[in-house]
Structure formats: C-alpha cells, structure tokens
Amino acid sequence: MLQKLVIKNYAIIDHLVIEPDAHLNTVTGETGAGKSIILGALSLILGERADTSVLINKDEKSVIEGYFDVSNNEVFKTALANAELDYDTQCIIRREIAINGKSRAFINDTPVTLSVLNTLTSLLVDLHQQFDHMALEDDNFQMEALDAIGGSTQAADSYRKLYYKHKKINQQLTEHREKRAQWQKESDYKQYLLDELLQASFKEDELEHAEQQLKQMSHAEHIISVLQAGRMMLEEGEQPIVNELKRISQQLQSITELVPEVKPLQERLASAHAELKDIAAELEAEEGKVALDPSKMDELQQRLDLGYKLLKKHAAKTTAELLEWQHKLTEELKATMDVNEAIERLAKEEGIIFKELIAEAEQLSAMRKKVIPSFAQKINELLILVGMPNARFDIRTEPIQPSAHGTDRVQFLLDANKSGQFQLLQKAASGGEMSRIMLCIKSLTAKALHMPTLIFDEVDTGISGEAARQVAILLRELSQYHQVICITHQPQVAAKGSRHFYVYKEADKNERLSTRIKVLQQDERVLAIARMIGGEQPSDAAISNAKELVA
C-alpha cells in the first residue's frame, strides 16, 4: 500500500506530499491543474525514463519518493531477496534527477538499475492509464483472473509446483544425456588408455627403483672394486686399519693405571675400532648385493622403456602420477555407468510425474472451461452498466503444450459494436474502454487475487449518468480489498472516495504558478462536487445533488 508520495522540484510542482488512505482515493481538479504531472512523477519511481526538462528549478535536483507498506506482501519480499536487497516492512522508493540530467534510483537507500526498479515496483503499483494494455497482453494475468473467478487458484498452484518439479527433472535428464553423449565419444579412447596402464601394472615408485637398480648394474664392476678396496684397507691389507687400531688400544690400556688421563683416549680408540669393524662387515654385505645379471638388466630396461613411453603419453613425471591417471580413468569410466543408471532412474520418474501433470492439467482445464460462460456473462453485464452496452466480451481457450499455467492458452476477446467479429481485447478496445474493462475484471477477481495499489487515470472518460455511477460503485467495491487511487472528472466517482484530494494551482510570491494538493473536508468536498456538476458558481440544486452523492 502507498502510504506517502513526496514530489520535489518536478515540472510545476515545487513540493508536494500526498498521503492516501487504504481504500478509494479520488483525485479531482481543473484540467491543467497538474493531475497528470503527479502521475508523471509517480511513473518515475515505477521505472520510467527521466527528462531534465521536468526540473522547475535548474539549480536543484528533482526528487520523488514513495513510501510503501509491504508488511503483507510476500511476493515483493521474495523479489527483494532475489535482487539481493534488504527487506523492511516499509519500503522507500526514491528517484533523483540531477541538474546535469543524470538519473538515479534507490530502493531502501540502495542504488538499483531502472530494470530492477521497474520489476519490483510493478509488484507495488498497477497504473492504468489510457492505452495501457500491458496487463491484458500478459497471458498470466488472464489465466489468474479466470482461476480467481472459477475458484481454481489452489488447483493452479498445485499444478504449477508439479510443472516446475517436472521441468527440473527434465533439465537433469538433459544434462545427464549431454554428459553421457560427451563421455561416449571419449570412452573408447579412455578405456584403451586404462587397459594400457592396467596391463603395465606398475607398482608404487617402480620406475624410480628400476632406474636406480639399472644404474647400479651398469656400474657393478666399479662399485664392487671400490667396496672391496675399502674393506681390504680396513681388514685384509698388510697393515689393516682395524688391527692397527686394536693394537694401539691395547698398548694404551697397559698405561692407564700409570697415566689415568689416557683412559678416555683408549676408550675412544676402542669405540672407533668397533665402528670400523662394523663398517667393514657392511661393506662386505653391500658387495654381495651388487649383481652382474644381464637378463635382469634387460628386464629392467624393458620396464623403463614402457614406463618412459607412458610417462610421455600422459605428460607425467613419476610412477605416482601414472597411477593417479589410472585411478582417474577408472573413476571416469565408472561415472559413465553411473550416469546411465541415473538417466534410467530419472526417465522413469519423469514419466510418472508427467502422467500426474497431465491429469492435473486436464482437471484444471475442465475447471476453467466450466466457469468461462458465467465469467463472460458477468463481464458483459458489467460492461452495460459502465457505458459499453454494444460491447460483447468473450473468452476462448486453445490447447498448448504444458506450460507453467497449464495446457490452455486463454484469450480475452471483444466485439466492440455487435459486429459479430471478435478481436483480441487489447486490439479491439480504446484506451478508455480498456480501463473500464480492466475495472470490471478486477472488481470480479478482487477477493481472490493479491493486487498492488491500483491507479486509474480517468477510467470514466466518455461516460456520465448511470454508467459513471456504476463505475463509482465498482471502484468502491474494489477498494474494500485493495488500495485504489482514481483521477476523475465525474462527480459520481469523486463522491464515492473514502479520501478526496483536490489538485489546484497557486501563485507564489514571485507570481510563479505551482501545483498544490489538499485533502477536502466534508463541506469542501460537497462544494467541489457541486462545481463538477454545475460549474464554478453551483446552484442550490447542484449543491443539494452533491450532498446527496456524498451522503
């Protein structure tokens, strides 16, 4: 609900504050007083393009602010979350036009693009101006209106949930099938690569160990000679180091009582003797490990050749990387089998849900078709009342593939002059007729449909008398469920308002005219309506008539 509209420095408005109530707000005033200018300012916070020519004071920016109560608007709350904007029970929409012509838009003080602004404010304000056919060009609105009248809104919601569930499964099926098709192109080659690695059957670090072994075998003679020479010097030479150390240790042992300080040195020599003896034994053991086996060398060379080939093919550097490739190929080929199982499972699930979807669609379609004759009849009855006695309204459906709103395309048609030729409503109706038809439709759906603030710009153009009274009644009934703002020149409509705004021009101290607006009290309201009936100087009869209308 619109709580307050503030307009600063826009066209001939220097500063204006409008605070409508929750029901029917009527706006009257002389032609040229600025009613359309107020709507123009409002359209800016609904996402319309800005023009610097609207700046009355070229030294100040123009600011239009709308304060909305959105505490019960769950759809708007969800839309804010989707746009990553903060939610509060009061939403402030602001539009600024700078003196350089640049325009900025804000929602709760967060800058937004005009596209985002337009999307979000469409959930807050529904502005019906002349030649505004957008709602009737929207198949969703026509479907929702039909469901609201026929009591099939709940069935439509149930169908829609099932539709999106089916759509999600279909998307998953498509993704899995595309994945499988891609994998199938590569699976034969991947299987060949995997078989090659499995056949090679490399063990962990095998290539690194084989390379080391082959190097040892290639230098076996040199290795053995070095090991033997070292062991000989320690144990088997003319003066083996081990024996010499033992002899020196024994000699030092004999003088330790005489020279106690020698004792530690003797112990260190004994320790060195034992260590060198162990080294000699280990040298002999290592010598025994070095083998000159030509067949073993050939075997190792063959494994290395195979390994180097596979390393190059897979751009790998180590045995570990080859084994990682082997594991990856195994998992990818296993995934191909898994995706086949997933496709089979999803296809089965999709078939079951599709049957349920078609069953619900048929039920929904039957409910809609059942209510069409009575809906069309009610609209035709209302059209007579609102001054369109020669118009005929009709609704036709045609089958379509399942969509988010069912398996029907709903079209609202109009024969404006009993010609027998029905056309799409948005093509057959004039701007004023369109507004009245929208009023008729929304008055019938008011209880069932959640709608934003409804603004009608001269919905009563071209009618008077009883037709204007009926328009007023419809507006009043509609306002019991939704906030309505109506700009009108008809006294019958103006009198039905729960709050009556009067727009007028007033000169300031510089003799510059500016648009003003005020809420009329009871006596002021009677006089304003009397003037709408009888002119600037209304007669007693006009005043009496005005009192009767207001009462």
Image: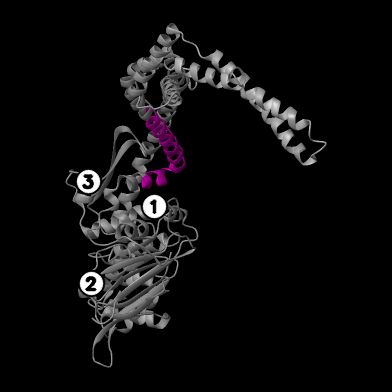
Numbered disc in front, either 2 or 3: 2
Real-space CA distance between mark 2 and mark 1, rounded to the nearest whole angstrom: 44 Å
Residue segment shown in magenta: 144-173
The quadrant in which residue 383 appears is bottom left
Real-space CA distance between mark 2 and mark 3, rounded to the nearest whole angstrom: 40 Å
Question: Sequence order check: which comes first, mark 2 or mark 1?
Answer: 2
Question: Sequence order check: which comes first, mark 2 or mark 3?
Answer: 2
Q: Is residue 441 visible?
A: yes
Q: Is 117 or 181 nearer to us in this picture?
A: 181
Would you say residue 78 sits in the magenta stretch?
A: no
Q: Are marks 2 and 3 in contact (CB under 8 Å)?
A: no
Identify the element where label 2 is drawn.
loop
Residue 23 placed where, x, y %? Answer: 43, 66
Q: Is residue 413 left or right of residue 112?
A: left
Q: Is residue 41 left or right of residue 89?
A: left
Identify the element where label 1 is drawn.
helix
Q: Is 333 or 530 nearer to us in this picture?
A: 333
The quadrant in which residue 433 appears is bottom left
Q: Give the number of the disc on residue 444.
A: 1
Q: Which residue is mark 2?
A: 101
Q: Residue at x 39, y 27 (%)?
A: 317
Would you say residue 167 sits in the magenta stretch?
A: yes
> In which quadrant will I find the C terminus?
bottom left
Q: Give the number of the disc on residue 424.
A: 3
